[in-house]
Image (spheres, helix red, strand yellow):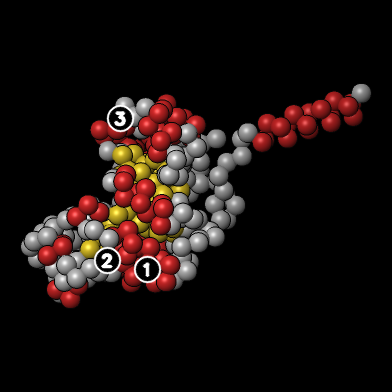
């Protein structure tokens, strides 16, 4: 009788465990996916090699980079469509050649110790960090840069990064048509749709439509609720929320049960256990 009860108890524990297995980090521990927003941009000037290196040193899971195009068709990492805020230059990114844009100082605005930091090329970043840290690629304002999706595809394909076997490349954009186009070009790479606060009332039908070509629904953290997280998961997608700049914000998203947190400060997320 005791043996029978023991067997039944063990069986019950096994069945319950099937539904409560947490996501595992490479070290076998449960943890939230930690995405360094524009690199560790709370510690170094955003979208520079200094910020990406800091994120790597802080053991983030991914660096997030914003990709745009120069006048001569080169892919570069910068967030704004102008260089005004993060360099000593003025004007639109698309009005500069690569040589011209790399003459700008992209670090001094953040701190004197970063003087001389350049705007890096997309190729520089993936050559330096592929295989070392995940790379979340945002196609920034692709409507301004015809052919951007093809150029990103070419760069990844040339490096045999179009068929990742470790899930360490993700492509996303606020331009959902661009996401669809990129997914057609790179079907083996996970893609995500970015969603601002205007998507607070996203419907189940819209989520189901996104899921036909996207693997992630990545919203502004201010619209994240328990219900949204559950509905995104029901649609078969994961959810990475942006942009965390305080510990309180990170803790709130952890309680909501998101899969990943995009943050300027990786230390707010690092080793944060996944909610079961």
| Distance CA(mark 1)–CA(mark 3) | 35 Å
Q: In terms of secondary structure, where does tag 2 sit?
A: strand
List x then y, in percent, for residue 21: 61, 39
Mark 3 or mark 2: name the one nearer the start of the chain: 2
Q: Residue at x 37, y 27 (%)?
A: 203
Viewed as shown, does residue 143 lie left or right of 224?
left
Q: Which residue is mark 1?
A: 155
List x then y, in percent, for residue 210: 40, 38
Are the residues at dot 2 and dot 1 in contact (C-beta closer than 8 Å)?
yes
Mark 2 or mark 1: name the one nearer the start of the chain: 2
Q: Residue at x 54, y 60 (%)?
A: 165
Are the residues at dot 1 and dot 3 in contact (C-beta closer than 8 Å)?
no
Answer with the quarter of the image where residue 103 lies: bottom left
Q: Which residue is mark 2?
A: 75
In this view, the residue in front, 202 or 265, is 202
Q: Residues within 10 Å of mark 1 (few under 14, many from 20)?
A: some
Q: Residues within 10 Å of mark 2 (few under 14, many from 20)?
A: many
Q: Residue at x 47, y 34 (%)?
A: 235
Answer with the quarter of the image where residue 219 lies: top left
């Amino acid at each position: 009788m005791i043996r029978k009860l023991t067997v039944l108890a063990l069986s019950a524990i096994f069945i319950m465990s099937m539904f409560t297995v947490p996501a595992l980090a490479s070290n076998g521990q449960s943890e939230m996916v930690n995405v360094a927003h524009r690199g560790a941009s709370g510690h170094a000037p955003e979208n520079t090699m200094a910020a990406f290196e800091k994120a790597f040193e802080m053991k983030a899971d991914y660096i997030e980079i914003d990709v745009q195009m120069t006048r001569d068709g080169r892919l570069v990492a910068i967030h704004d469509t102008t260089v005004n805020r993060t360099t000593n230059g003025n004007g639109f990114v698309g009005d500069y050649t690569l040589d011209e844009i790399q003459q700008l100082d992209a670090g001094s605005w953040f701190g004197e110790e970063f003087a001389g930091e350049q705007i890096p090329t997309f190729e520089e970043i993936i050559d330096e960090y592929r295989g070392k840290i995940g790379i979340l690629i945002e196609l920034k304002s692709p409507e301004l840069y015809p052919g951007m999706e093809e150029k990103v595809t070419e760069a990844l394909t040339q490096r045999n990064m179009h068929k990742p076997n470790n899930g360490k490349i993700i492509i996303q954009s606020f331009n959902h048509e661009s996401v669809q186009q990129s997914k057609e070009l790179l079907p083996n790479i996970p893609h995500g749709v970015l969603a601002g606060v205007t998507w607070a009332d996203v419907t189940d039908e819209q989520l189901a439509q996104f899921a036909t070509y996207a693997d992630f629904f990545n919203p502004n953290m201010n619209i994240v609720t328990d219900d949204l997280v559950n509905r995104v998961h029901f649609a078969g997608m994961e959810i990475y929320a942006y942009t965390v700049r305080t510990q309180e914000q990170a803790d709130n998203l952890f309680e909501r049960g998101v899969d990943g947190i995009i943050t300027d400060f990786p230390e707010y997320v690092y080793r944060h256990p996944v909610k079961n």
